[in-house]
Image (tube, rainbow, N blue to C red):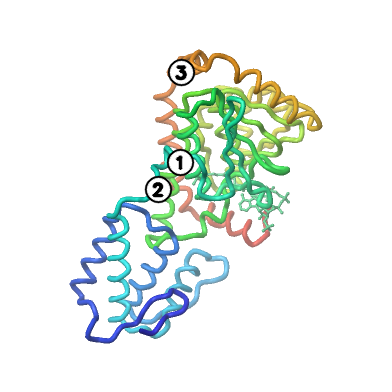
Amino acid sequence: PLQVPALGLHVRGPAMLASQKDFNNAVSQVKLLKEDPGNEVKLKLYALYKQATEGPCNVPKPGMLDFINKTKWDAWNALGSLSKEAARQNYVDLVSRLSASSESPSPEAPAADRKQPESDSLVVTSEDGITTIRLNRPAKKNALTTQMYHDIIAALQAASKDESAITVLTGSGDYYCSGNDLTNFTHLPAGGLEEMARSAAALLRDFVNCFIDFPKPLVAVVNGPAVGISVTILGLFDVVYATDRASFHTPFSHLGQSPEGCSSYTFPKIMGSSKAAEMLLFGKKLTAQEACAQGLVTEVFPDGTFQKEVWARLKAYSKLPPNAMRISKQIIRNREKEKLHAVNAEESSVLRERWQSDECMNAIASFLSRKAKL
Ligand SMILES: CCCCC/C=C/C(=O)SCCNC(=O)CCNC(=O)[C@H](O)C(C)(C)COP(=O)(O)OP(=O)(O)OC[C@H]1O[C@@H](n2cnc3c(N)ncnc32)[C@H](O)[C@@H]1OP(=O)(O)O
């Protein structure tokens, strides 16, 4: 068979081609897949569907900043003059491979039992009664990729069951975390912007739920500036230690977005409604000292002695009776767990709409085209 280079697909002879009925069945089957096949595969499915139903790409190339439609256009255009029938067959073959692999049992351990993350961007270690989850993408200021959200969920689930007494989240390099990786929004699935927003909202909700439900003491060791979701979820930690080099920035309006991480509830509760509004509506950046004065940060340390002082303290705390700490945390958290879950659901659903807005798309395009920086 011939190969279509960009997508690695095969062109078959006419005798082997799938019927329109096979194709229609495959289109229905895609919606029933148990596992998300990932953005690359979804893009292939999109391109083959367009080629099978409309023939070779016949619409103008979208502009440079319209990165979502341009990615889809590129995938469709890469199929060149592949016939509708061959595209139909390739679509059917691809769906049948996806269905087979989603039926067969996974050789991997369930995510909750997996200790090591899928990528090097997260490092999980356990020592001295402390499980440390370290964001490890310093060249990108520890911006959170979609894979990292999944890995953090898995790491928290594993830490909730391991032997450690305390769990810590921290960052590598000069930043704690620059928030959501804005390129997450450029990998458009076959279902388009709407599907991207739906799956991001579901991931956000699962991610934040893990912090709400985490059963042991959870400590943030904020080793540098923090942006976006890495700031909002601090309201769900039990203790937050920060270097005096840290800053806390939630520029949601600048990004055409709205608060998450339960911050629409925790921030007004922690710092009062007016200070919370300055951060969440106007994107006021707080210094470490200001964040401490507002109650978001527990204690600020000089950068030169930050690591030494904080880890010495955490090692001492980790020797306290672990069951007593768990039970005490549960009593505190149980007071408002239901409320936090409701807030998380609402914030995720509002963001699902926001992510489809022009305000949000334009802000992301500006950042990616280097026009905007916070
Ligand atoms: C699915 C759940 C979604 C949850 C919703 C979450 C929302 C949020 O978290 S909103 C906040 C999103 N974050 C941002 O808007 C920050 C964007 N970044 C910046 O404004 C700046 O990069 C900076 C202020 C964080 C740092 O500036 P600077 O010190 O000048 O460093 P560089 O800009 O040169 O950054 C180095 C390198 O890292 C890349 N990068 C940094 N942050 C992000 C990011 N959030 N997403 C993607 N990429 C990021 C930056 O592009 C540079 O890359 P290279 O040019 O390739 O070196």
> Is there CB contact under 8 Å for labels 2 and 1?
yes
Residue 288 visible at all: yes
Find residue 161 and report its horizontal and vertical position in percent: 45, 29
Find residue 20 and report its horizontal and vertical position in percent: 20, 75
Estimate the spatial distance between the alpha carbons at disc 2 and disc 1, rounded to whole Å: 8 Å
Q: Which residue, given by chain and number where applicable, does mark 2 sit on? A: 108
- Is the shortest distance between ligand 1 and the CB of mark 3 under 8 Å? no
Q: Determine the image quadrant of residue 287.
A: top right
Residue 53 visible at all: no
* Front position in the image: 308 or 175: 308
Number of the front mark, 3 or 2: 2
Mark linked to residue 114: 1
Query: In the rendered view, does 89 fall on the left or right side of 44?
Result: left
Seen in the picture, residue 29 relative to 13 is either above or below; the reply is above
Give whichever of discs 2 and 1 has the lower sequence position. Answer: 2
- Is the shortest distance between ligand 1 and the CB of mark 2 under 8 Å? no
* Front position in the image: 308 or 272: 308
Tag 1, which secondary structure? loop
User: Type of residue at label 2?
Assistant: Glu
Q: Which residue, given by chain and number where applicable, does mark 3 sit on? A: 330
